[in-house]
Structure formats: C-alpha cells, structure tokens
Amino acid sequence: MPLHDIVSPGGIIPALKVNGKKQAIQELAARAAELSGLNERVIFDTLQQREKLGSTGIGHGIAIPHGKLAKLDRMFGLFARLERPIDFESLDGQPVDLIFLLLSPEGAGADHLKALARVARLLRDPDVAHKLRESRDADALYAVLTMTPSAAA
C-alpha cells in the first residue's frame, strides 16, 4: 500500500543528525509542527507520553513513534533516515536508523492502527529497508516509501 496519502515529499528528512532518542523525537516534532501548523510542544509531549508506555523501536533498525492529536484533521507522517544509528530502546536492542513518525486525529482508532501496520509492514520488508538505507536524497526516499508493493519487490 502506498503511503503518499500520509507523507508528503516535504515530510522526508534524508540525513537527520541526532545523538539520541529524545533529540530525534524533538527534531521530528519540530518538522511536524512546521508542516502541519500544530504546536511543536503538543506533538513532542504526545510522542513522549507514548514512548513511556514502551519503545516504538520495532526492531531491525526501525522506529515508528506515533500519537493522536485533537487538532489534527487527517493522518500525517514524516520519514527520517538518520545519519548515524541511535539507541531507541528497541525491542531487539538494535540501534535505529530509520524513523517514521505517524500522527493521527484523536478519533482515528482503527485507521490509526491500520496505518501503523501498513508502515511497519513496509519498513520491515528487507528490500525496502535496504533501498531506504542506500538512498541519499529526499526524492529517492519518497519514491521508495510511496511505490506500489509490486514495484517494491
């Protein structure tokens, strides 16, 4: 399933420089606020609250921080490829270098879960993950994220 309905070309960060999980979440919250018009602090606090429930590092170098926001009217995503992998307290203990931020409207129960599953499935695909790690510019990363499943193979 393509993700072009969630992430825009402007929502791609090809080489994010961060030293840790908190800084990564801060940087992503800042970019999300810039693109969505929502309050950066509200986004950051929402993501931090979710991380307190358990890490959104799903393993294989991938993290999907996510949350629901009252003032959001549609699902919103950002993707970042980190310049250097960081500790994200992932389930498998591996450092993270691919992060997909997913924000959903407060009432998007099942849709939020479906979007999370769609992102996780895509990023866990070894071919897709390899292409994302090899791509160096935003356009190439966006193309990998939004291609149709048959083209991803």
Image (tube, rainbow, N blue to C red):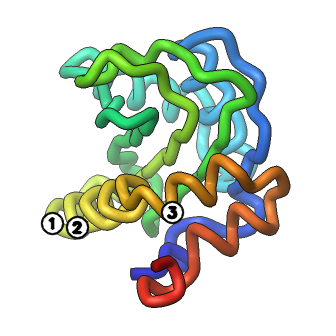
Q: Secondary structure at mark 1?
A: helix
Left or right for 113, reference 96: left
Please tell me how crowded label 2 is: few (under 14), some (14-19), or many (20+) other residues with Cα within 10 Å: few
Residue 38 location, x and y as percent? Answer: 60, 46
Left or right for 140, reference 65: right
Residue 105 location, x and y as percent? Answer: 36, 58
Please tell me how crowded label 3 is: few (under 14), some (14-19), or many (20+) other residues with Cα within 10 Å: many
- Judge whether 6 appears above or below 36 on screen: below
Q: Residue furthest left?
A: 110
Q: Which residue is mark 2?
A: 114
Locate residue 56: give its quadrant: top left
Left or right for 82, reference 115: right
- Judge whether 63 appears above or below 142 on screen: above
Mark closer to the observer (3, 2): 3
Residue drawn at 37 percent across, 49 percent down = 70
Locate residue 114: give its quadrant: bottom left
Residue drawn at 37 percent across, 42 percent down = 66
Identify the amino acid type marked 3.
Val
Identify the amino acid type marked 1.
Ala
Residue drawn at 39 percent across, 64 percent down = 122
Q: Which residue is mark 1?
A: 110
Mark closer to the observer (1, 2): 2
